[in-house]
Image: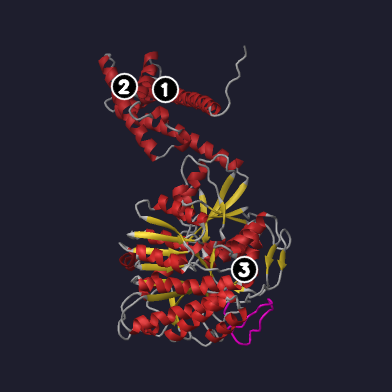
Amino acid sequence: MTVTPPSGPHFPAQSSSVSRTGRTTVQARRIALNVVLDGVVSALAAPVARWLADPHGGWLHPLWFLAGGGITLLVSGLPFRMAQQYWRFSGLSDLFNIACASALSAVLFSTLLHLAGYPLPSPTFPFIHALVLLTFLGSIRMVWRLSARRRLMVAGRERVLLLGADHEADLFIRAMERDQEAGRRVVGLLTGGTQQAGRRIHSCPILGTIDETPEILNQMAAAGRLPDTLVITTSELRGAPLSRVLEVARLHHLDVQRTPSLTDLKPAESVELRPVAIEDLLNRPQVALNSQGMSRLIAGQVVAVTGAGGSIGSELARQIASFSPQAILLIENSEYALWQINLDLSERYPDVPRYQIVADVRDRRRIAEVFHQYRPALVFHAAALKHVPIVESNPIEGVLTNVIGTRIVLDEAERTGAQAMVMISTDKAVNPSSLMGASKRCAEVYGQALDMRARAGNGGLRCVTVRFGNVLGSTGSVVPLFRRQLEQGGPLTVTHPDMTRYFMTIPEAVGLVLQAAVRGTQEASGEDTTDQKLRQGGIFVLDMGDPVRIMDLACQMIRLAGLKPETDVEIQITGLRPGEKLFEELFHGREAPVPTDAPGLRMASPRTVDFDVAAEAMDALEAACLREDLPAIMAIFQRLVPEFNHNRDGKTPSRTDHSQPDVETIA
């Protein structure tokens, strides 16, 4: 009877067993080859050392003399694992082991000669024998390694120019030597040091500095020696300097890649390069964060995060968890998003207690129940409807979530004795042209009024409002949209060729939000400008740098994919969508940005409203939403936000009222 072998999990195990057997056989062969070669070399070293010690004694010796030289070396090499050395990667530690084995072998060989009654050729014979062994054994390994490198250089098809620090280039070249299948050859280095040109690392010349990249590439092009790829080995090359490198590479039709982090360049692994990320182009120098202040604010406290499953809310939860709060309340109305962030926190911070709370910020009864049960000391309010066209299509829902939901969270936080609430706002609240922007500005108005009342009475809930622009990778952001369109082969859709937006990475934005929370909850310090502005309804604005043209961003993402804009991938202009603005602003046209004493934060001083007036407007707004009375909602918006100019048809707005900010061009 024929028995069919079972399928399923048994086959991988069998295959693994065969694979292990094969590897063991190969390793045994390599060790045997090392033993034979070391034995032959050490056998030849014995008569050479004999002749050097006594040139007149002749070359010919008994056969046991040769065998003894080989055997003593093999025995002496056992403690130093010489037979297991990988000759192609021999280094200083291997040379040290060879030196120790050579000295021990020379002593052992001379001892055997003495015991056999054979006179030493000279008193210095043991030292000469050890030096000859060291020279022969070291030389054969060096020749082997150089020949392997030579084969790699000859076989290399891709010419690579490295940009980075000297120690990073050293590590990359070493890792590349171990990757026989990489097919790359380093033709030069550009470093950050100004005094290194003309020197060499692993026979690769240092051609100059990274700032001299345009001149050096022009020289290489004139000489017909252009590399195929620029490889960036340093993580410090970002922002504008990186944009300049990419522009020069584009002019010369060169590909640009990044290496993994230094800790990822492991000897046994291949060197896998990756494209330059768009975040690297937009990233700015790291802002010094007040980590001690954040720890004092958060450690040991119950902290609530609304919208905890969103892009900003989830990063807030992660960074808050790093400061060891007593507990985190993850408030989210999406079950899947709540499950995701809870799983992430359980893996990153398993010791931080977490409570998964399914709740809608518009549900006053549910929010009151949660806040009375857990009584959070700090509340970070990130829950909102943020997508402009969606809010335009669902205005009542947008107002209920962004305005009424914010009021409910603020009121319940105040009733349960919370110390502060941090409200996430948006640049779209400045001179809003959309219902989303107007709703966020109304939420700002109520938060300002409540905060001013608390600061005037020296007690009560502090409401710290933080305003910023787009964050890379967030839900609905243009960068993930462009990536998805690129994966599908295009086209990339841009609403207007002159559209600009502010950008910041999510971790950077959230770090500054926590910075604002620390500064906004500090006690007033007399005549300090920041405290004065806070008492007057000031709003923190993150330093977003310069705005970026979306058209430039689309072109750069196409280039980073190794393609050409309009040639390989089309860019389509679709026109402004309802409520959309051509350019965003972080400050009202009439208000000057005021620097604060906290790095990365500026202060806006928008119009304020008395708390009773704001509360009455919120009551009227909620009643209008329940009646689904959109004209009444628009009238209240116009009263609270006089600068609201609704672009309901998606027309290109006039720029006569506000000046266009300086725009950063991404090369």
Q: Give the range drawn in magenta.
A: 643-664
**In contact (CB < 8 Å): disc 3 and disc 2:** no
Q: Along the polypeptide, which appears first: circle 3 or circle 2? A: 2
SS of the residue under disc 3: helix
The circle on residue 39 is 1
**Hey, which quadrant is residue 243 in on the image?**
bottom right
Please provide percent x and percent y for residue 23.
50, 27
Q: Is residue 211 above or below residue 450?
A: above
- Kindly identify the amino acid type of the residue bearing the numbered disc 1: Gly
Q: Is residue 462 above or below residue 148?
A: below
- Cα–Cα gap, marks 1 and 2: 14 Å
- Residue at 61 percent across and 87 percent down: it is 657
Q: Is residue 625 above or below residue 260?
A: below
Please provide percent x and percent y for residue 199.
47, 55
Residue 599 included in the magenta stretch of the image: no
Residue that carries the numbered disc 2 in the rendered image = 109
**Hey, which quadrant is residue 399 in on the image?**
bottom right
Q: Confirm whether residue 199 shows in the render.
A: no
Question: Where, quadrant-wise, is the N terminus in this rendering?
Answer: top right
The circle on residue 435 is none
The circle on residue 390 is 3
- Residue at 53 percent across and 72 percent down: it is 400
Which one is in front, 305 or 466? Answer: 305
